[in-house]
Amino acid sequence: MKYAQVQNCIGGAFVSPNAPTLDVYNPSSGEILSRVPLSSAQDVDAAVQAAKAALPGWSGTPIKERVQVLYRYKTLLEQNIDELAALVTEENGKILGEARAEVLKSAELTEFACSLPQIVTGEVLEVSRGVECRVERYPVGIVAAITPFNFPNMVPNWSIPNAIALGNCMILKPSELVPLSARRIVELLSEAGLPDGVLQVVHGGRETVEALCDHPGIAAVSFVGSTRVAQIVYRRATSNLKRCLALGGAKNHLIVMPDADREMAATNIVASMSGCAGQRCMAASVMVAVSATDHIIARMAEVARAMVPGKDVGPVISTASLERITRYIDEAEALGATVIVDGRGARVPGKDGGYFIGPTIIDHVTPDMKIAQEEVFGPVLAIVRVKNVDEALAVENASPYGNAASVFTESGGVARYVMEHASAGMVGVNVGVPVPREPFSFGGWNDSKYGVGDITGRGSIEFWTQAKKMTTKWNKEAGVNWMS
Ligand code: NAD
């Protein structure tokens, strides 16, 4: 075991809960990296008590002072990028370039949090003679963030910087598959000057999450993960009268028109379906090819075939994932789809125990096949052929998910039409991964997100704060009017 057993962080101290553990694997080699505790409701309570002790001091600190910690944290993320990225690669498997991009994104998220004092300045208006109304934002209190395996550094940083900049104290529950990055996040925040107790980390799985949803001391829960668990968490947290924002899975459609630039479309689409081994909630999953697009598909096949597993594409997270992804491909093939680039059975020299599958492109998939409907979460692209843009939109609109959709075309009119009519929260033109960058907010529609607001950017401010409306009158001669 390369790393000591993972510990929780409570009130600034790393502690080992008295809990059963799970092994943590390196997906590139199949070797055991560490063990992670499955914390209990008691461990969650200890974290809540530590957050409670820190809350008055932190929420009472002016926001301009609070974000000074985050300026230093951003610098530390940048200074330590090599080590942080290597850790992401080790526990998640993604290749080093992707891991570095993830840490850079964490720095961008923190940069946005540093700008919050300029954004949350409140509102003030003289509503009648001598009477003033003012709105100020207050923290929600103690909040929790539950995160998935696919971005061990970035997704925790979707929630932490904004939530704490806005005065909350937080409990992070990382994915039990990738628990190692969280410790470095806490250590760097502490080095940046974050007071003990503002951020706790409690490791675990289902039971830990349920305890977070049930604890009366926690006011809000953000969740990122699969739709199945997003529904469980949203229902449980809101039935306990907490606010909840739960981001779920995805099935992203890229609509490709015959006039699309061949090289631009081919390279962007392959990068989207294969980046992070397809384990991105923004990954291209279905290409809806409109009429004569064979020239683009042929070029995509060339680009995908040139990619080397282990060098250009990392492994997927587990043997279970590898088996699930392979099953989807086998089943589509058995039903008559054509596997034009086949990544099954990929072998990486020296990494025999790794969970590798190369980029896989499957043509002539029909919309009724499972691979066209369900989230595969691997480097696999299903191509569905249609005759026109309305048929393409019908395929996209039929999906219960709604994270991302994109169109590849040289026509402004078609681009606008698709952006307006796609049933997704994040849409793009000639981009494979239409991720909104800060200060814009990240969040999908339909079964890709439950709750109001978004998890990053301006859209998160409403979620992490509550507005206080203040009405004041000091001039005695103003008298009493019909409203105040
Ligand atoms: P997951 O749903 O299995 O796990 C997410 C979190 O929920 C983990 O912390 C896990 O410990 C916890 N959990 C698992 N089962 C639970 C249960 N029964 N009850 C309570 N908690 C439980 O997701 P994952 O496999 O780690 O991540 C991949 C999924 O996340 C994909 O579906 C992907 O699309 C999605 N995702 C979505 C976004 C987005 O922005 N919409 C971003 C990243 C990932």
Image (cartoon, rainbow, N blue to C red):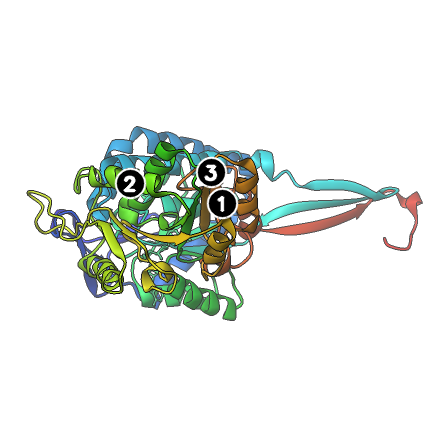
Q: Is residue 5 visible?
A: yes
Tell me what residue is drawn at x 25 percent, y 55 percent.
Answer: 338
Tell me what residue is drawn at x 50 percent, y 59 percent.
Answer: 446
Q: Where on the image, by quarter, is ligand 1?
A: bottom left
Q: Which residue is mark 1?
A: 427
Q: CA distance from mark 2 to mark 1?
A: 25 Å
In the rendered structure, which disc, 2 or 1, sits on the residue that comes first in sequence? 2
Residue 63, image x, y percentages:
54, 38
Q: Residues within 10 Å of mark 1 (few under 14, many from 20)?
A: many
Q: Residues within 10 Å of mark 3 (few under 14, many from 20)?
A: many
Lateral position of residue 260 relative to residue 118, left or right: left
Q: Nearer the viewer, residue 395 or 160?
A: 395
Q: Secondary structure at mark 3?
A: loop
Q: Which residue is mark 2?
A: 298
Write down the quadrant of residue 434 in the picture.
top left
Tell me what residue is drawn at x 91 percent, y 52 percent.
Answer: 480
Q: Which residue is mark 3?
A: 409
Residue 363, image x, y percentages:
30, 52
Q: CA distance from mark 2 to mark 3?
A: 17 Å
In the rendered structure, which disc, 2 or 3, sits on the residue that comes first in sequence? 2
Q: Nearer the viewer, residue 246 or 372?
A: 372
In the rendered structure, which disc, 3 or 1, sits on the residue that comes first in sequence? 3
Q: Amino acid at mark 3?
A: Thr
Tell us which disc is closer to us: 2 or 3.
Answer: 2
Q: Secondary structure at mark 1?
A: strand
Q: Is residue 187 visible?
A: no
Q: CA distance from mark 3 to mark 1?
A: 14 Å
